[in-house]
C-alpha cells in the first residue's frame, strides 16, 4: 500500500512523526512545508511543498501545483494528514485521485476542531480528534487516543 503522509512543519510534523509505527511495512512518502526534514520512516527524502494559509487563493496555487506533481508521481492509495492547510489540501487532491483519506486533528485543538478539520469533513474518510469530549459531541469524529 502506498501512503502519502502530509504535515506542515512544527507541531503538525512532530505529531505525524510520532505515528510512524503505524505505517511500518507500507510504501510511505512524507511531505512537509520545510526543507531538510528527516523522514520518520523509510529512505525516501521528505518532499517539500510551499506553505499556505486559507486567506488567499493565490498563495494556495503553488501548494496545489506541488501536490498534483507528487500525486502523479506517487499515486497513493491512502493520504494521512495531521494538518494544517497544506494537509487539508492534500486530502482534497487525494480524493480527486481516488485515494482514501484520514485527517488527524492536532492536540492543540482542545476546545473545537480546527478550521481545516472542519473543512475536510466532506472529503475525509476518517476524521480523528485527540480529545474524547470532542468526539462525544460530534458523531463524525473518532477518538483513538492522544499522540503526544
Image (cartoon, rainbow, N blue to C red):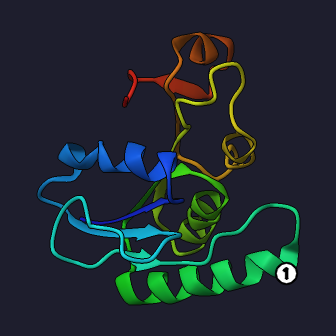
Residue drawn at (16%, 68%) of the image: 42
Q: Quadrant of residue 61?
A: bottom right
Q: Is residue 65 left or right of residue 46?
A: right
Where 73 falls versus 101 (above or below)?
below
Q: Is residue 102 visible?
A: no
Q: In the rendered view of the protein, which quadrant contains the N terminus? A: bottom left
Q: Is residue 10 above or below residue 147?
A: below
Please, is residue 28 above or below residue 81 in the view?
below
Q: Residue furthest left?
A: 25
Q: Is residue 38 visible?
A: yes
Quarter location, residue 36: bottom left
Helix, strand or loop for disc 1: helix
Residue 74 percent coordinates (x, y): 36, 82
Question: Disc 1 marks which residue?
Answer: 58
- Name the residue nearer the viewer: 98 or 92: 92
Q: Position of residue 41 (x, y in %)?
A: 19, 61
Percent x, y of residue 79? 44, 60
Residue in view at x 35 percent, y 69 percent: 37
Q: Quadrant of residue 66?
A: bottom right
Quarter of the C terminus within the rendering: top left
Residue 118 % position (x, y)? 73, 40
The residue shown at (46%, 57%) is 100
**Which residue is found at the position 57% from the left and 66% from the top?**
90
Q: Is residue 88 above or below residue 96?
A: above
Structural crowding at the residue carrying mark 1, measured as other residues with C-alpha within 10 Å and reported as few (<14), some (14–19) or many (≥20): few
Q: How many marks?
A: 1
Amino acid at each position: 500500500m502506498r501512503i502519502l503522509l502530509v504535515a506542515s512543519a512544527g507541531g503538525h510534523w512532530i505529531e505525524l512523526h510520532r505515528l510512524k509505527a503505524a505505517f511500518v511495512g507500507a510504501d510511505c512518502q512524507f511531505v512537509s512545508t520545510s526543507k531538510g526534514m528527516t523522514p520518520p520512516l523509510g529512505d525516501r527524502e521528505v518532499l517539500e511543498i510551499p506553505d499556505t494559509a486559507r486567506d488567499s487563493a493565490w498563495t494556495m496555487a503553488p501548494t496545489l501545483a506541488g501536490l498534483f506533481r507528487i500525486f502523479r508521481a506517487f499515486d497513493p492509495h491512502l493520504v494521512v494528514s495531521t494538518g494544517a492547510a497544506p494537509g487539508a489540501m492534500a486530502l482534497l487532491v487525494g480524493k480527486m485521485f481516488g485515494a482514501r483519506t484520514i485527517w488527524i486533528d492536532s492536540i492543540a485543538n482542545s476546545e473545537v476542531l480546527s478550521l481545516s478539520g472542519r473543512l475536510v469533513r466532506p472529503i475525509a474518510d476518517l476524521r480523528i480528534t485527540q480529545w474524547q469530549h470532542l468526539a462525544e459531541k460530534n458523531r463524525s469524529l473518532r477518538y483513538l487516543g492522544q499522540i503526544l
